[in-house]
Image: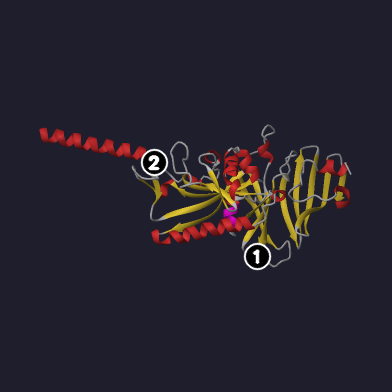
Amino acid sequence: MRKIIILIFTIIFFLLSCKGEAQKNDLNKSDNTHNKNINFDSVLKSGDYTWNESYFMTADYGVIYNEKTNPFGNLTIYLIPKNKLKIKNEQIEQENNRVNGLSIDEYKKKFRIIIFLIDKKDLNYAKSGDPFYYQKPAYEEKIYSYDENVKQWIFIDSIKILNEGENEKEQAWREKYISDQIQSDTNPKNSNAFTTRNLNSKKIIDSIAGSNYFLVEEQECDLNNDTFRDKIIVLGNNHDIDPQNPETRIAPILILLNEQNKKYKILTNENIYPNNFGDAFRRLVVKNQFFTIELSNEVSDKYISSKFITFKYDQKNIILHKYAEIINWSVNKTDKINYSTKDFGTITFLDYDSNIISEKVNSK
C-alpha cells in the first residue's frame, strides 16, 4: 500500500511539473503569424535602435519572445529612412537617442519598417540562457513590413532553414532583402507605392485582403509596354455597407507593376468603390495602356446609373484619362456626363476619389 501511495504522489508531482514548464515555455500554441490582421505596433518600442550605415535596427539579439510584451517570436526590426540620412560618427549617439524617442506613428511616417520574424513555435527555451529563447536547428523566418497606403502590416516573403549549416543562407537572404529596399525608391512622395521583390501575387493579395476583403477580379496586362506582365486586382468588401462605418465603403483596387520580373511596385486605391454612394463593381476592361473600371448603382423607383472610370499609363505614372456617367431616371429621362483631363486636370490613380470627382470638375 505504501508503495502505491508513493507511486501516486510521484505521478502527480511529474504532471504538475510538466504543467508548470508548459506555462513557462509557451511555444506550443498555434502559429499566430498566419493571422492576416497581425499587428506589430506593440513591439516597435520594445527595444533600442542603433544606427548601422544606412538604417536603424534593434540592438543585440533584437526583440526576444515574451508572452506578455512580444507574443510573436524573436524579432529583428529595421528602420530604413524614407529620406536618406548622412550621419557622421560623432552624430551616431545623438541620432540613436533621437530615433529611440520617436513615437510609433512617427516611425511609420519617417521610415520603411521591416520586421524579420522567427515564430515562437520555432523557438527553444533555455532557463539560464542568454537569450532565453533561441531558434531551433530547423525553422522558418518571415518578412513583414508596414504598408502606409493600406495601413496594415503585410507579409512579404519567407525562408525555411533545415539545419544549422544553412544559417549563412538565412543571413544572405536577409541582407539581400534589406539591400534591395535601401536601393529602391524611398521618396516620401511615393509612400503610397509599396515595393516588394516577391513576385507571388497571391501572397500580396492575401496579405492585403486579410479577413476584410475578397478577390473579385484579377487581370494580367502590360500597362507600361515593357513586355513584363503587370496585374490589376479588384478586391471586394466582406461586409455589407453600413452608413455608420466608413470602412464598409472601402474595397481596394491594386495595380502590380512588374519591374523586370524582380519585384512588383504596388499601387493601391481605396477610394474608387463602394464609396459614399454605395456603387457596385461591374467589370474591368483593359486595352493596351488603358484600363476602365465600370461601376453600377440602382435606387429603386429613382434611377439606375453606370460609371466608367478610365486610367492611362503615361510617362511612368497612371493618371485619370476619362470619367463618364450615365443616369437612367425612372421618369424616362437620361443624363450623360463625360469628363476628360481638360475638365479635371491631372489626377493620378493614387489620388483619384469617387466621392469628390464632381467637386474637382466643377471647381475648374
In the image, is 282 to the left or to the right of 71?
Answer: right
Locate residue 109, reporting x and y percent: 65, 43
Q: Nearer the viewer, residue 64 or 327?
A: 64
Locate residue 209, reporting x and y percent: 60, 47
Q: Amino acid at mark 1?
A: Gln
Please provide the residue range marked out in magenta: 200-204
Q: Quadrant of residue 29?
A: top left
Locate residue 329, reporting x and y percent: 84, 41
Locate residue 14, reporting x and y percent: 24, 38
In the image, is 356 to the left or to the right of 91?
Answer: right
Q: CA distance from mark 2 to mark 1?
A: 44 Å
Residue named by callout 1: 260
Asked if the residues shown at circle 2 and circle 1 are in contact, with their CB atoms under 8 angstroms apart, the answer is: no
Label located before the other in sequence (2 or 1): 2
Question: What is the number of the mark on residue 26?
Answer: 2
Q: Which residue is outermost to the left?
A: 1
- Which element type, helix, strand or loop, lies under badge 1? loop
Give the position of the N terminus as an image quadrant: top left
- Which element type, helix, strand or loop, lies under badge 2? loop
Question: What is the number of the mark on residue 48?
Answer: none
In the image, is 102 to the left or to the right of 122?
Answer: right
Question: Which residue is depicted at the point 63% across and 40% down?
Answer: 106
Answer above or below: position of 192 versus 228: above
Question: Which residue is depicted at the point 66% across and 39% down?
Answer: 248
Q: Nearer the viewer, residue 245 or 36?
A: 36
Q: Amino acid at mark 2?
A: Asp
